[in-house]
Image: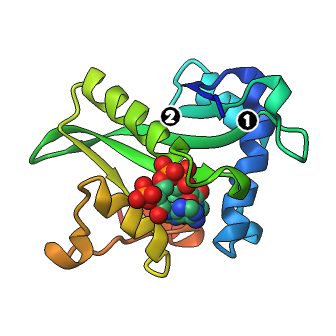
Amino acid sequence: MSYIIRPWATRDLKDVMRLIRECAKAHGALDQVRTTPEMLRDHGFGKESTFGCLVAELPSEQKSKSGHTIIGYQFHYLSYCTWDGHILFGEDLYVMPDFRGKGIGTSLLKKAAKVALEKGCSQFRFISASWNQPAMDFFTKLGALDVTFSSSWNLCHLDGDHVRKLAEKVGK
Ligand SMILES: CC(C)(COP(=O)(O)OP(=O)(O)OC[C@H]1O[C@@H](n2cnc3c(N)ncnc32)[C@H](O)[C@@H]1OP(=O)(O)O)[C@@H](O)C(=O)NCCC(=O)NCCS
């Protein structure tokens, strides 16, 4: 099976949105997806693009049963660590079930690691659900360290109303 890994283009917006929803569904979180193809276009291709995305693409004669050629994706963005300088943060990594175990996920991460080096990053970080042992095994095999345990780091989110409430306290 042949495939290519390439940076996404605006023609991929619908496919990437489809895969984002598939990935969220696999995490039991489809109801939490609020992004739209329009948002992805504005945030990913606008003047101040905030992230990059890589896609795995099959030749058209090898398309999936459902008729798709874009069968995997990986999102990443630049972040900054006060101890290390620039780091790359990998948001999602997803390959459609029928195409797993063929090296595509690894190829997506390899290409993302290249992006990290090209952008002068000293680290490539990503998160994985604690129940997702296959994904943890996959990342560990590539040399990733689970800092939740090794360094006792916890990931914290401040969502919606809490962000607003905090911002409203400016000057009070
Ligand atoms: C994790 C994931 C991206 C790996 O993609 P992939 O294309 O199957 O990865 P590769 O073929 O490069 O590597 C497969 C390796 O990962 C392991 N693996 C992990 N999850 C797997 C799965 N669901 N199916 C098949 N292999 C899986 C295999 O054992 C294999 O190990 P090996 O190299 O020793 O044979 C893919 O399983 C996936 O999309 N999972 C659902 C989403 C997810 O969990 N994303 C990661 C957290 S955001």
Q: How crowded is the residue under tag 2: few (<14 C-alpha within 10 Å), some, or many (20+)?
A: some
Horizontal side of residue 164 vs 166, given as left or right: right
Question: Where is residue 155 shown, x and y percent of the image?
Answer: 35, 70
Question: Where is residue 168 shown, x and y percent of the image?
Answer: 48, 63
The C terminus sits in image quarter:
bottom left
Task: Point out the tag, 1 or 2, that comes first from the N-terminus.
Answer: 2
Q: Is mark 1 within 8 Å of ligand 1?
A: no
The circle on residue 70 is 1
The circle on residue 39 is none
Q: Are marks 1 and 2 in contact (CB under 8 Å)?
A: no
SS state under label 2: loop
Question: Where is residue 152 shown, x and y percent of the image?
Answer: 18, 78
The circle on residue 51 is 2
Question: Where is residue 25 shown, x and y percent of the image?
Answer: 73, 68
Q: Amino acid at mark 2?
A: Phe
The N terminus sits in image quarter:
top right
| 102 shown above or below 97 | above
Q: Nearer the viewer, mark 1 or mark 2?
A: 1
